[in-house]
Amino acid sequence: MSLWKQPADLARINAWSANTMMETLDIRVTAIGDDWLQGTMPVDHRTHQPYGLLHGGASVVLAETLGSTAAMLTLDPEKELAVGLDINANHLRGVRSGTVTGTARALHVGRTTQVWEIRIESEDGALVCISRITMAVIAARTAGLR
C-alpha cells in the first residue's frame, strides 16, 4: 500500500526545486515506489570540498531534500506541512566524481512527527552516507505559506 497522499509525478515533484539550492546542486528525484523515494546529485565542483571529495554538507542537503520531499508526499498540503526538526549523517566513504544516489525510506510516519532514513550510495553501490531526518508535521496555516 502506498504512503503517498499526493501524486507520484516526478516532473511535478522536481518542479518544486525551481530557484532553490536543489536546483543549484542539480538534485533530482528520479524514482518513487510505494514507500520510498530516490534521487541523485552530481559529485562535481558544486558539491566538492577543498580536497576534491564530496562535501559532507552536500550529502546532508541531498538527504534532507529526499526526506523532506517524501514527508510532504504523505500529507495533504492544504491541511499540513512537514518541516525539518533534526538531521544527522554519518559520512562513510569519500567520492570524487560521478553521481550519488539517495534513497529515503520511512521509519515512522506519525500524526505529528515522521522519521526517515536516507542511504546515499556511489555509482558502484558503495554506501557513502547514512542519514536520519526527523520531520515535524505542522498545520499549513501555521507556516504562513497558504
Image: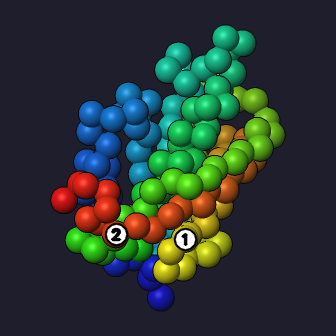
Image check: 123 left or right of 41?
right
Seen in the image, is 60 located left or right of residue 23? right
Residue in the picture at 61% in, 75% down: 108
Residue 8 visible within the image = no
Badge nearest the viewer, 1 or 2 = 2
Q: Relative to 2, does residue 23 appear above or below in the rendering?
A: above
* Quarter assignment of residue 103: bottom right
Name the quarter where the C terminus is drawn.
bottom left
Which residue in the rendered view is the most extreme toward the left?
146
Residue ID at (67%, 41%)? 122
Q: In the image, which disc is placed on residue 135?
A: none
Q: Position of residue 49 (x, y in %)?
A: 64, 17
Vertical side of 27 occupied by 53: above or below: above
How far across and down, in percent of the image, does residue 44 sit?
Answer: 54, 21
Alpha carbon separation for disc pair 1 and 2:
12 Å
Q: Residues within 10 Å of mark 1 (few under 14, many from 20)?
A: some
* Residue 133: percent from left, percent from top: 61, 56
From the top left corner, tell me how far across and down residue 42 is, in percent: 51, 32
User: Which label number is shown at residue 113?
Assistant: 1
Report the front residue among 67 and 10: 67
Q: Earlier in the sequence, mark 1 or mark 2?
A: 1
The residue at the point 67 percent across, 56 percent down is: 132
Label 2: few (<14), some or many (≥20) within 10 Å?
some
Q: Which residue is mark 2?
A: 139
Three-letter amino acid code of the residue under disc 2: Ala
Q: How is the image coloured?
A: rainbow
For badge 1, the amino acid type reads: Thr
| Mark 2 residue element | strand
Is residue 86 something one can see in this rendering?
A: yes
Check the image and name the residue furthest to the front: 142
